Image: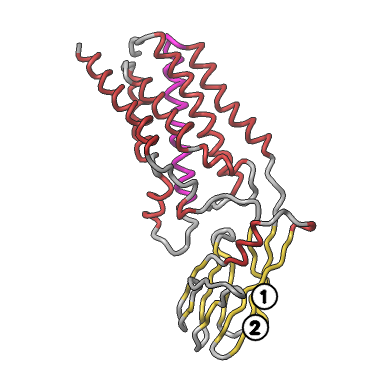
Amino acid sequence: MPGVRIAQLLLLVAMTALLLPGGATPALAHAGGLSSSTSEARVLAIDPPVPGLDVRAAEFGARLRIENGTGDTVVVESPDGSPLAALPAVASGAVAYWVDPRVTAAAAGDRPDGDRLAWSVPLRVGSSVATVHGEQFWPPPPATALWVALALVALAVPAVVGVLGAGRRLGRVALAAATVVVIGSHLLHVFGSAGVPEDQPYALMLLSAAGYALLGWPLGAVGAWLTVRGHVGGPLLCVAAGGLFAIVITPIDAFTLVEAVVPFSWGADFDRLLVALTLGGGLGVVVAGMAVLRRGPVPAA
């Protein structure tokens, strides 16, 4: 029967979607290799002030940015006794980004009393010397219990409605709607993450943050459409997409639920909402989809 053959083909696609990532490196949590953290770097001052020289923390403190508006080359000095040679020498009129080991060392330490830890980066401006003074700041942690509870609600709603409505149109609509919410939430997460890296093309950062979602998005969209149409393969694709997002893609993003600093263009709490919906909703789609599959095909409306 044609319907059975199509379902077998969809099963092959779904299993490939779930098994292919097992032999590859998982996608990064955010674009450009950025990730959430408990602290954020801040530049406070340059001592002595150098006209035309601007240094600031970029990308939520992940890197420092120097803009050289002086007439001399600015060299970032290596730490004392370090053979490190990857720190930038910035020509006049140029801009450079770098990860400084002194900032990294400050961020790796335990949370200090007062939630602030000073650091400094020496510069050589022509024949003169200047020092960038900054601090590592630990914001209050997020309300993790709230976000975990939201993820559980996102799991429970489609799961309960899908199980109770399995064998009826209600179950199919709930499954399709939950799948759309999951892929839509992850799309927004990727779009907001891709805008954070300052010196990379936005399109390239979209690909960096998407990873296996390039397979999951169309898989879920087609699955939702076929599910509403009453096709036997629709719930199967929804289950594959939900499992891909909840088990393979989103767990690395779950750190945003417990860490204060989130590299996201539209606010940390909005990203936490999107992650909770993707993670919990993806599991809910799996449960609902399995319930619908067990009840067998249902005539379309």
Residue topped by disc 2: 49
Q: Residue at x 38, y 49 (%)?
A: 207
Q: Main secondary structure of the magenta part?
A: helix
Q: Which range of residues does the magenta coloring cover?
A: 166-193
**Where is 283 relative to 171, above or below?**
below
> Is residue 200 a member of the stretch shown in magenta?
no
Q: Residue at x 57, y 72 (%)?
A: 82
Q: Secondary structure at mark 2?
A: loop
- Picture coordinates of residue 173, whole percent (x, y): 43, 20
Viewer-nearest residue: 259 or 301: 259
Q: Residue at x 47, y 74 (%)?
A: 95
User: Pointers 1 and 2 in contact (CB under 8 A)?
Assistant: yes
- Picture coordinates of residue 133, whole percent (x, y): 67, 73
**Where is 157 relative to 74, above or below?**
above
Q: Residue at x 51, y 11 (%)?
A: 164
Viewer-nearest residue: 33 or 234: 33
Residue topped by disc 1: 45
